[in-house]
Amino acid sequence: MLSDKQKSALKIIALILIIKILRKKRIGRRPDTDSLLTGPGYMKELVTGNPAHCQEMLRMKIEAFVSMCHHFRIRGWLQNSRYISVEEKVAMFVIALSHNIRNRFVKRGFNHSTQTIHRYFYEVLHAMLNFSKEIIVDTPYDQSAHQIRENRRIRHIFQGAVGALDGTLISAVVPHDQQIPYRGRGRGECYQNVLAICDFDMLFTFVRAGWEGVAHDSWVLRETMSDPANNFPILLPG
């Protein structure tokens, strides 16, 4: 007969074996991405379905989305992966930004892991940075072209005016040890003070970003105008 110590040892060994078997079989555990609608299936639904649904999710018309993806592919900034197309990568990126949601929410629609969403988000981000260099370009400033021409009454009141200038606070993501100067105007969140000029056709003709939220508008204007490298469009008399 077995002693009490031997019985206890056998029970412990049996318990260890049961735990190993349960871990190996993963009893009761289901895959995290088990939706019946795959990523390509969701993309097909967006592209071929109701145009309003596509515009609601991607914040752009389907023609613009397809054209942008085609441009990225032609320029070599993005290519199809083994299982994920360029269109699907861009859609994941656009949906995450336009709806301000985390990767965990994006993966529910496209049925990919969080790591996959994260990897392709940054791949598309680099493509977008290249795209921005083609889209955002400096234009020569023509003072006469920005003056009021249509409304005679306003043109008489604002004779010689070429636009409106103002500063605005825009949310900023700042490292924790640098947040104090960006907590401007007594608010808890971090902001940057952005100086902008808009003409009478509602088009921006100048933007200067990056100043801390506590910076006063007059200080931002004075420092911006004093630095020739900023190419401020209107010079002071003299």
Image (cartoon, grey):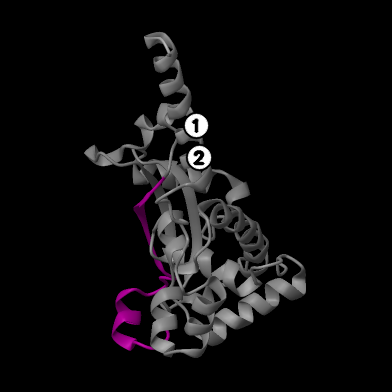
Looking at the image, residue 84 lies above or below residue 105 = below
Asked whether residue 61 appears in the rendered view, the answer is no
Looking at the image, residue 11 lies above or below residue 71 = above
Magenta stretch in the rendered image: 148-172
Residue 206 appears left or right of 66: left
Looking at the image, residue 43 lies above or below residue 136 = below
Q: Which mark is residue 58?
A: none
Q: Do residues under tags 2 and 1 come within 8 Å of each other at their CB atoms?
A: yes
Q: Residue furthest front?
A: 1
Residue at mark 1: 17
Q: Quadrant of residue 85?
A: bottom right
Amino acid type, mark 2: Ile
x, y percentage for residue 106? Answer: 45, 62
Determine the secondary structure under disc 1. helix
Residue 113 within the segment the image draws in magenta = no
Amino acid type, mark 1: Leu
What residue is at 48 percent from the left and 45 percent from the top?
210
Q: Which mark is residue 21?
A: 2
Tell which of 175 and 198 is nearer to you: 175
The N terminus sits in image quarter = top left
Label 1 Cα crowd, 10 Å radius (few <14 / some 14-19 / many 20+): few
Determine the secondary structure under disc 2. helix
Q: Quadrant of residue 2?
A: top left
What residue is at 44 percent from the left and 13 percent from the top?
6
Residue 185 appears left or right of 91: left
